[in-house]
Amino acid sequence: MQIQNNIFLDLRHFQLITHSLVFVFQTVFTDHSLFGFADTSAIITNKFLQISLADCNHCICVSHTCKENTVLRARMPHRQVSVIPNAVDTAVFTPDPTRRSTLRITVVIVSRLVYRKGVDLMAHIIADICPRYPELQFLVGGDGPKRWLLEEVRERKFLQDRVTLLGSLEHSEVHDVLTMGHIFLNTSLTEAYCMAIVEAASCGLLVVSTKVGGIPEVLPPELIYLTEPNVPFFIIEALLLGLETAIANLKAGKVVSPTECHKRVKSLYNWMNVTQRTEIVYNTIAKEKRKTLGAQLRNYLASGAAPFLLVVSLCYLVLQVLEWLVPRRAGILKFGNAALRPVNNIATCSIDD
């Protein structure tokens, strides 16, 4: 039995799922993102997703919020969607309080500097809170089209010595940046599951974050200060209040110690647990009966994409011709720049950019 695992990124994966189903592979779709329903791009993306998953065996989502989003977008039954969160390598992301400044409180931000990550909120918060707390400094890792906004605030408010923009970071450099901070700030406007706050908590930082998407599911209340999202002005005020509360508790010593924080994260998240839960999904669908072409076409028809039946039928006919010319054998099956590599009866997906 061969299982195709696919992580949603772009139309190449839409093509890959289609080919996998024509090859009669059992197919698993993994979703790490949240999408809307109103704008044109979201409507088109959701329609492609619905068609792609019309005959998919199972889905894996990283949070319950992500699951609800996928179920609504793809119109899949709840029973076909499992929630398996990501994990963190706690052996790498360990606390090191000796790297922290003893004279200043360091707020760390590690994020892509794009609108969805709330860079506009970052700029307002830095401009508002720095005059209130002379001992506060910001360390910002990451790059993106919104970087100019932070540079502008730094120049306009004369914060060159208190706001450091590190630019793009390799993942191997993130730990060293995190361990220099006392507080981690996340201003995302939407998030299915935020790995950054898990890594920060594993390094012993206090986490202040917007309460959006799947973030409330990630960390226990004692490790994170969540701020309710609302209209832009109130989001800024809520984040400022959360940040000020974290600063006050830090000064008063009313916080979980970095070592204890790391232990809590280590007990909650590990890749062995993720692997075991994923294997349960694979083993379950491996026992399912393979669907016939007729059953697949009926599923696609139910998704409201009748013209797509011609595409699937054509792919099936081409496959039969190729099977006659070159009989199937163990090895690597390639579709353009994507490859299926059967290993122990499980086909994994790799994309070469």
Image: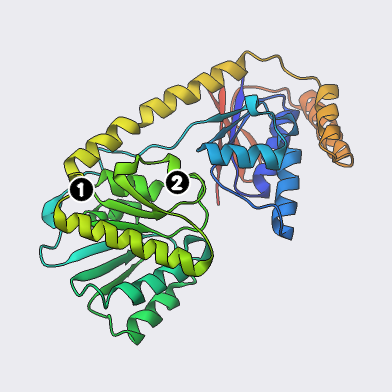
**Kind of element beneath mark 1:** loop
The type of colouring in the image is rainbow
* Amino acid type at image mark 1: Val
Q: CB under 8 Å between callouts 1 and 2?
A: no
Q: In which quarter of the image is residue 76?
A: top right
* Amino acid type at image mark 2: Ile
Q: Which residue corresponds to the image point at 49% horizontal and 51% vertical from the top-left?
A: 212
Q: Where is residue 51 in the image (x, y as percent from the top left)?
A: 76, 39
Give the labeled residue for mark 2: 215
Distance of mark 1 from mark 2, alpha carbons?
20 Å
Q: Which residue corresponds to the image point at 11% horizontal and 67% vertical from the top-left?
A: 103
Q: Around disc 2, counting alpha carbons within 10 Å, would you say few (fewer than 14), some (14 to 19), or many (20 or more)?
A: many
140 over 210 or under it: above or below: below
Q: Which residue corresponds to the image point at 34% horizontal and 62% vertical from the top-left?
A: 241
**First-in-chain label (1 vs 2):** 2
Q: Quadrant of residue 17?
A: top right
In the picture, which quadrant includes the N terminus?
top right
Q: Which of marks 1 and 2 is in front?
A: 1
Left or right of 284? Residue 273 is: left
Q: Where is residue 330 in the image (x, y as percent from the top left)?
A: 60, 22
Q: Any mark on residue 129, and which?
A: none
Counting labels gives 2
Q: Which residue corresponds to the image point at 69% horizontal and 31% vertical from the top-left?
A: 20
Q: Where is residue 57 in the image (x, y as percent from the top left)?
A: 67, 26
Give the labeled residue for mark 1: 255
Q: Which is more toward the observer, 140 or 186? A: 186
Q: Around disc 1, counting alpha carbons within 10 Å, would you say few (fewer than 14), some (14 to 19), or many (20 or more)?
A: some
Q: Quadrant of residue 134?
A: bottom left
